[in-house]
Image (tube, rainbow, N blue to C red):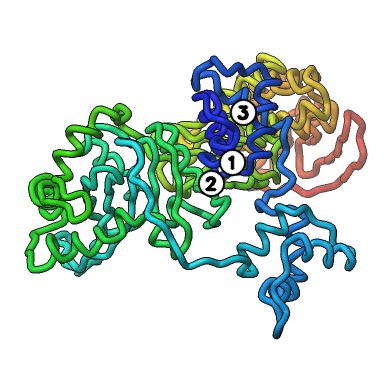
Amino acid sequence: MVEIREVLRAWLEGAGLRVVAERAGVDRKTARRYVAAAQEAGLERGAGFEAVDDELIAAVVSAVRPARPNGRGAAWESLLAHEEQISGWVKGEGERRGLSIVKIGELLARQGVQVPYRTLHRFATERCGYRAKDTTVPITDGEPGAELQVDFGYLGYLTDPVDGRRRKVHALIFTAAFSRHMFVWLTYSQTLMAVIAGCQAAWDFFGGVFKVLIPDNLKPVVTDADPVNPRLSQGWLDYAQHAGFATDTARVRSPKDKARVERAVQYVRGNFWDGETFTDLADAQRRVEAWCAQRAGMRIHGTTRARPAEVFGEREAGELLPVPGVYDVPLFREVKVHRDFHVEVARALYSVPGAYLGQQLSARADSELVKLYHRGTLIKTHPRQQPGGRSTDKADLPVEKADYALRDVKALLAKAAGHGQNIGIYAERILDDPLPWTKMRTVYRLLGLVRRYGPDPVETACSRALDLDVVSVTKVASMLERATEDTVPLLPAATAPRASRFARDPGEFASDRTSLATGGTPAASDRTAPATTGTTTVASGRTATLTLIRGGQPVATVEAIELEEER
């Protein structure tokens, strides 16, 4: 995406396809395909860079799908198997001279290897030593304000007052090719953030941005060093678009490509760093900026025989691009959508719609937002989270799992209430707990009963359970299994209190104890009218008859039981 933006930016500025390809670090044919696809999508050359939005980039990516993700085609891969043989043809053997590229192509064709001439020429030049030359010619300084050469150099050690460690100090040196005016940025690291911080400080020092930067093959800037078609990092291209400059990297082990800054490393180390004492890195940075303006800028340069600061002020300062605003350094990553519907960016998790499970996405994360792209199309935007944090959009998760995964008690209650009023009240009673999410599975079981038996029976069962103040989904499930959810419970009827089993009428205990004690004869009424109570019939006198009654019918009779006098 950043590569396409760079091509379209140069094309909109009026550059030709060759220049566009060189600035973007792509092949001219690739640049032509990008431009043609953008024109088919509605981009006009008179439009500004603002017209290049995410929708246009997505249309270009959809129309032009690179068939060579590694930057090499099938022809180059076929030549790798013949590299040793091609090297022998290029160098020659004995008295035989080296062969031309045309002849080498013919010999390969006889072996069944058909490759384009330009591909074979690049292969022979890059890997087989074809026409290697050691001579050079002086390069002109170019137009004022056009070129700025950049290089990293090691200066020495400095004790960090924060942790007391001795740390390596590197100098990022910027040298204007025309005036030789320089700026030095000191840093402990060689990361992309350190390079961009140095660039921002350099624009403030120079008062503007140079049109072209020529950096060394720094890892944060160049991901794939190549003499013809180097691949720049996405972070660097994004910053170049922000600042408005183009990048022309130097070749590997070719110091002559940036000769203006190459000797400046020894000059900064010997004239500024050696023999000095600094309290910390900030103190060294303040002093090196003053040194660049007063000492290095006001010296008589050995080649130009002029003061760099004066030449810069007179010829270059007015030709620079305006200083850009504050740049939020982004993080670019290729991420995979895992089975939990999230991707990991800088040790934080961000949700993605389920349609992209298992696929690779491109992530761009700055201090505010994290943008996720699939084949050039923006599919999701999240606020940036701290490491260990998580940003989850409920819409990205499956409907049946979203509430439980997010512990959304309110949504769960709303889902229960949607099946019936009493079901909703019953769910509220279940979740009425200091830790409601620990009861969510119980509510899910209640919703499972709704799916199994339907909402009406569960509504009736919940109503009965609420009437009896029973909050138990197990009881509700039992009612539904036995189909008793709409049966009115039989409560015992309210009746008057009955007498106890062994209660006797007081008249039964009325007797003439005196006559019984003296052996007298009981009254006739006592002999002829026996008293009946409960299940027992008692006859007065010395004997009695006992009748056992069950269900109102006599079942047994015992006679001639002697009565004790004291009873």
Q: Residue at x 71, y 83 (%)?
A: 95
User: Is 534 left or right of 4, judged from the image as shown?
Assistant: right
Does residue 470 appear in the picture of this structure? no
Residue that badge 2 annotates:
333
Whole-percent x and y of residue 523?
74, 29
Q: Type of residue at label 2?
A: Arg
Whole-percent x and y of residue 430?
58, 30
**How many labels were placed on the picture?**
3
Q: Quadrant of residue 531?
A: top right
Q: Secondary structure at mark 2?
A: strand
Front-lying residue, 423 or 68: 68
Q: Residue at x 71, y 22 (%)?
A: 492
Q: Earlier in the sequence, mark 2 or mark 3?
A: 3
Q: Earlier in the sequence, mark 3 or mark 1?
A: 3
Quadrant where the C terminus sits is top right
Residue that badge 1 annotates:
362
Disc marking residue 57? 3
